[in-house]
Amino acid sequence: MTNNQTLLVVGCQRSGTMLASKVFADYFDAHWLDEFDVLPLKRGAWGLEALYRAGLTNLVVQCPCAIQYWELFYTAVPNIKFVFIHRDKE
């Protein structure tokens, strides 16, 4: 991840998305946003786009349910990357 990318951490609920996103944010020295900062998702994608245009581009966003709107985020936010967290139920 470079300084002009947004990382969106998605996955199943209770799979460790919050922990993973906080580790990524700390490692990349990025701003961390919680899922409640981008919900509802359509407005959240536009909000992330506005942050990107304003110059706040080094972001890590933890939002497990955003995977269902991946196309919206992919088209709205330049240089977005997705990390999908999968938890084995065993």
Image (spheres, rainbow, N blue to C red):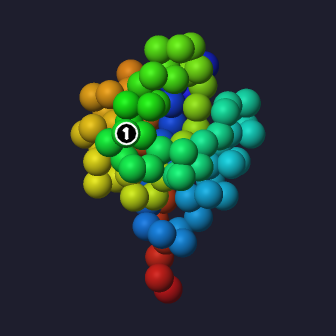
Q: Quadrant of residue 50?
A: top left
Instruction: Reply above or below: 79 against 70.
Output: above
Query: How many numbered circles does the render carry?
Result: 1
Three-letter code for the amino acid on which mark 1 is drawn: Arg
Residue annotated with mark 1: 43
Confirm whether residue 84 shows in the render: no
Instruction: Reply above or below: 75 against 35.
Output: above
Residue lying at 44% horizontally and 31% vertically, measured from the top left? 47
Residue lying at 53% horizontally and 52% vertically, measured from the top left? 36
Residue 19: image x %, image y %? 66, 58
Instruction: Reply above or below: 44 against 59.
Output: below
Residue lying at 54% horizontally and 72% vertically, measured from the top left? 14
Q: Quadrant of residue 71?
A: top left
Q: Nearer the viewer, residue 67 or 81?
A: 67
Farthest bottom residue in view: 90
Q: Quadrant of residue 1?
A: top right
Residue 6: image x %, image y %? 51, 30
